[in-house]
Amino acid sequence: MAASEPVLFIEYPPCSTCKKAKRWLDDHGIAYTDRHIVEDNPTADEIADWQARSGLPLRRFFNTSGMKYRELGVKAMLDAGMAEDDARALLATDGMLVKRPIVVAGDTVLVGFKEAAWEAALL
């Protein structure tokens, strides 16, 4: 990864995991562009692109511990076979449905903060 190009760091600032991840980026001298997931919610196209680059199943992009996820009964919709296009459209409606933080660095997309995975991908 080219060190000169900042990574895109998508976060919800009050989130403790996001704060930890941001501290990790700062501690490792990784330049990033900050994006507030609620004020600038990812679009369905962005989510499709990130999913393709990450190789992760779409379910990994949902914030399964969030109130909104439970309120809307998203797990039941996904379990019932919700189409991926519909699931991406749903994610694009509200940043609180999206798992965070997300880091986009070239062809690398990391969802959630797992220090070992971040070290392997970003250092």
Image: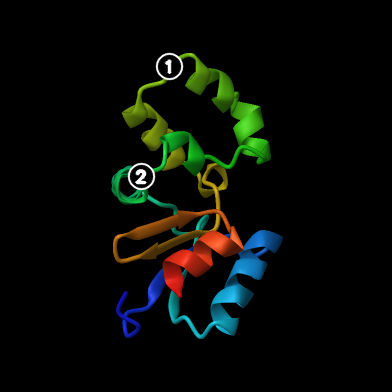
77 up-or-down from 89: above or below? above
Please give left or right for residue 44 compared with residue 9 in the image: left
* Residue at figure coordinates x 52%, y 60% from the top left: 117
Image label count:
2
SS for dot 1: loop
* Residue at figure coordinates x 60%, y 75% from the top left: 24
Residue 6 in view (yes/no): yes
Please give left or right for residue 27 compared with residue 82 in the image: right
Which disc is residue 81 wearing?
1
Residue 92 location (% of width, % of height)? 41, 43
Residue 67 location (% of width, % of height)? 68, 38
Name the residue type under label 1: Gly
SS for dot 2: loop
41 up-or-down from 56: above or below? below
Per the model, the C-alpha gap separating discs 2 and 1 is 20 Å
Q: Quadrant of residue 89?
A: top left
Q: Residue furthest top?
A: 80
Q: Which residue bears the numbered disc 2?
A: 55
Name the residue type under label 2: Gly
Q: Residue furthest right?
A: 16
Q: Are marks 2 and 1 in contact (CB under 8 Å)?
A: no
Which disc is residue 67 wearing?
none
Q: Using the image as rendered, state which of residue 50 and residue 15 is in the foreground.
A: 50
Which image quarter is the N terminus in?
A: bottom left
Q: Using the image as rendered, state which of residue 22 and residue 69 is in the foreground.
A: 22
* Residue at figure coordinates x 32%, y 85% from the top left: 4
Residue 15 in view (yes/no): no
Residue 32 location (% of width, % of height)? 44, 77
